[in-house]
Image (cartoon, rainbow, N blue to C red):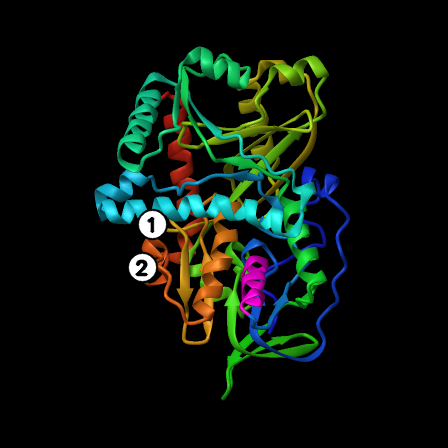
Amino acid sequence: MGMTGEWSALPSANSLWAATAEPARDFPVFAGEHQADVVIIGAGYTGLSAAHHIAQSGLSPVVLEANRPGWGASGRNGGVITAKFRLSFRQIDAVHGRDMARRMYEIAHESTDIVEELVSEFGITSANLTRTGQVKAAHNETTLRAAIDEANWMTREMGSAEVRILDRGGVREETGSDVFVGGVLNPGSGGIHPLNYLRGLADGLARRGVPIFQESPVMKLRRDTDGIVAETPRGVVLARQAIIATNSYSDLTGATARLQRTLIPFRSAIIATDELPRNLAGKLMPTSRTYTETKRMMRWFRMVDNRVIFGGRGAFGKQDSHAAFDALRKAMVGIFPDLADVPLAYTWSGLVGMTLDSVPHIGRLDDRTLFSVGYNGAGVAMSSLMGRYLAALVRGETPELALLDARRMKAIPFYPLREPAVRMVAGWYQFLDAIGQ
């Protein structure tokens, strides 16, 4: 079976994370025959967390990665950790009830906590994990009122007592920018060096004897009498169960391509400046939090090693887009005029897995195959947690998955039209943002 996607050796050709990461361990290419309790396809956060928790259970996992660990979204993302879903808790409450909203709130906070647990468990100091919070900065009075109303609801109904409302001056002190009219500070969120986190997990698992193989794409999954067989170009793994942990990169081979019909891949672009002069670096984002804005085509930003990192969705196609990077730079300078003459040092992009109902999904494709997909832009924390839940499912347990239960998942209708549909919706959002709606 031929490949249905393309890949290269690096997480991204011009990524800040690739340029500043700890050296990568070389893993072997899989060959021959191997037996395991669970074969895991994909060595991103989901797959590696699953391998860790499965091994802790006394079962034997083996991880097969088509490229190198961290090549996909786990090495390309912005390193922002948030206890949220794209669907707000208030929306969940309105549609599904208070109990469901509370359970989703618990899951979201468990996801941020597990990142801290894994960093500690494996001693990944190079991950540079922070838990200083995130500011949602409002670009007009309408969105500020909505953000404050949401924050007040969270405090009243979910017990988020530490949420703080910021006025215009408070957001100016936080960001160093005059363009926002106010905002909300959410505790518990944070930032991380995503590729160092990923490589720390992979290295730690390897040191504990968990088999991880790179450049070993699974070309075919098939059932046999005793379990499931994962075929690679140079060998096979015989396992009782399989986990597909490929998310938006599920189209790389036919073995995982069926998951693509549950996702809308949305390209997210990121830029990073040259190191800023000390006086300017001290002025912008001095608290080292992460920041988002309230526009529909949301941008986010953070300061890392005296560089401004600025990202957002809106790039299209299968490759990096100069137009998307130019648009990000224009938006960044609009917020931070002092950066107008600061060169960009890095530009890169990757795919975000979006779902129809705006939440991830985890569960079984059949009695032998499990999966977790669709992190909707909040994958660093959530995918780390889904590894724990996948291990529970492997053991035959039934964790309370709430809206994440795969039985709630819907396929994308008119799947071949997904890319033009995404372009149309994004264009409409960009228009509304431009006119201040």
Tell how many labels: 2
- Pointer 1 and pointer 2: residues touching (CB < 8 Å)? yes
Residue 117: x percent and y percent? 56, 48
Residue 182: x percent and y percent? 40, 17
Closer-to-camera residue (116/33): 116
Q: Can residue 266 be seen here? A: no
Q: Which residue is mark 2?
A: 408
Q: Earlier in the sequence, mark 1 or mark 2?
A: 1
From the image, give the main secondary structure of the stretch colored magenta. Answer: helix
SS under mark 2: helix
The verdict on residue 399 being magenta is: no
The verdict on residue 54 being magenta is: yes
What residue type is disc 2 on?
A: Arg
Quadrant in which the N terminus appears:
bottom right
Residue range (magenta):
47-57
Question: Between marks 1 and 2, how big is the CA–CA gap?
Answer: 9 Å
The quadrant in which residue 102 appears is top left
Q: Which residue is mark 1?
A: 357
User: Residue at 51% of width from left, 58% of height from top?
Assistant: 387
